[in-house]
Image (cartoon, grey):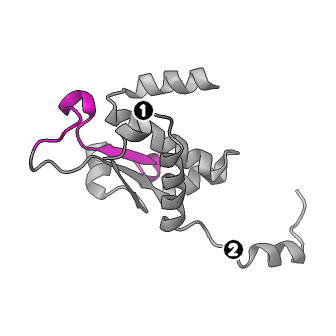
Amino acid sequence: MAEPSEGDAKLWGPLSAPSLDDIEALAVEALEALPEPFRSMSRGVECRVAEFPTEDICKDMDLESPFELMGLFEGIGMTDDGVVPHTGQMPNRVWLYRRPILDYWAEHTDTLGEIVTHVLVHEIGHHFGLSDDDMYAIDDGLR
């Protein structure tokens, strides 16, 4: 493996890892690119970005490391509750976890935008009532 040159170090020196806002911007782009009718049906789903899942989520999901989870759907899916939430119900929300996403990005060849889109679409799939197995089957069919 070649040693980095001084020029390489100067090129990378001013760069920093994508921020929470950068990940959120990629998520907004992905939401806007969803095909209809999914885009319209997803409008009520909030998208939030955090560094990691909370300790409670890690404990509830029996995760060995917070790096194991890149995203999470929080709420009641359409097949469980319908399109209109009951009074007092918190809005459905998709969480994207920056550090696990960046860790995955560093180890794979997908672009950061592709990873954010994949995680977002996967979590929105839960809003539509799709299981993980359903979404993996859809992913396999797209490749």
In whole angstroms, how far apart are the C-alphas of marks 1 and 2? Answer: 38 Å
From the top left corner, tell me how far across and down residue 52 is, in percent: 41, 59
Task: Identify the mark nearer the N-term, 1 or 2.
Answer: 2
Is residue 63 visible from the viewing direction of this image?
no
Q: Nearest the camera: 46 or 35? A: 35
Q: Amino acid at mark 1?
A: Pro
Circle 2 SS class: loop
- Residue under the image location 50 percent in, 48 percent down: 32
Q: Is residue 10 above or below residue 123?
A: below
Circle 1 SS class: loop
Q: Is residue 64 above or below residue 81?
A: below
Q: Which residue is mark 2?
A: 15
From the top left corner, tell me how far across and down residue 38 is, in percent: 42, 35
Q: Toward which corner of the image does residue 78 lie, by quadrant?
A: top left
The magenta segment? 62-86
Q: Toward which corner of the image does residue 143 lie, by quadrant?
A: top right
Q: Is residue 36 magenta?
A: no
Is residue 94 visible from the viewing direction of this image?
yes
Q: Is residue 69 left or right of residue 4?
A: left
Q: Nearest the camera: 61 or 138? A: 138
Q: Residues within 10 Å of mark 2 (few under 14, many from 20)?
A: few
Q: Is residue 69 left or right of residue 7?
A: left
Image mark for residue 117: none
- Residue under the image location 57 percent in, 54 percent down: 103
Q: Which residue is mark 1?
A: 37
- Residue under the image location 49 percent in, 53 percent down: 27
Q: Is residue 72 left or right of residue 111?
A: left
Q: Nearest the camera: 50 or 48? A: 48
